[in-house]
Amino acid sequence: MGATNPVSPKVTAAALAAAVTTIIFFVLSLVGLFDDVDAKALTPLEGAVTTVLAFVFGYLIPDENREQGKGVPPPT
């Protein structure tokens, strides 16, 4: 009897994209790439890039755990 993963692959991909984006921004700031950028401008930029990448990855990854039409009410 095998266990199934109840977490959607979409959620996993979006969370991974957000985490990797945050790490990349942190490393790039450590090496001095953002020295000339105001910290008040960098924070929203990182948030925006993270949000867009999380959406893109969540959108592109198919959800194998969800049956076609599951959760959609039948037409009346």
Image (spheres, rainbow, N blue to C red):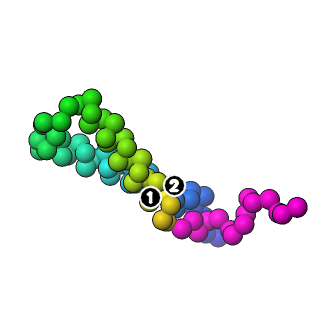
Q: Residue at x 27, y 33 (%)?
A: 41
Q: CA distance from mark 1 to mark 2?
A: 11 Å
Looking at this view, is 4 or 13 the one in front? 13
* Disc assigned to residue 56: 1
| Dot placed on the residue nearer the N-terminal end, 1 or 2 | 2
Above-or-below relation of 51 to 71 = above
- Image quadrant holding the N terminus, namely bottom right
| Circle nearer the viewer, 1 or 2 | 1
Q: Of the residues shown, which amino acid type is indicated by label 2?
A: Val
Q: Residues within 10 Å of mark 1 (few under 14, many from 20)?
A: some
Contact (CB < 8 A) between labels 1 and 2?
no
- Residue 22 lies in the magenta-colored region: no
Q: Quadrant of residue 37?
A: top left
Above-or-below relation of 13 to 36 = below
Q: Position of residue 45 (x, y in %)?
A: 31, 41
Q: Residue at x 13, y 36 (%)?
A: 36
Q: Position of residue 74 (x, y in %)?
A: 82, 63
Q: Residue at x 75, y 60 (%)?
A: 72
Specify whether residue 70 is in view. Answer: yes
* Disc assigned to residue 42: none
Q: Image check: 72 left or right of 9?
A: right
Looking at this view, is 52 or 27 the one in front? 52
Looking at this view, is 54 or 44 the one in front? 44
Q: Secondary structure at mark 2?
A: helix
- Main secondary structure found in the magenta portion: loop
Which residue in the protein does label 2 denote?
11
Q: Which residues are magenta?
A: 62-76
Above-or-below relation of 54 to 37 = below
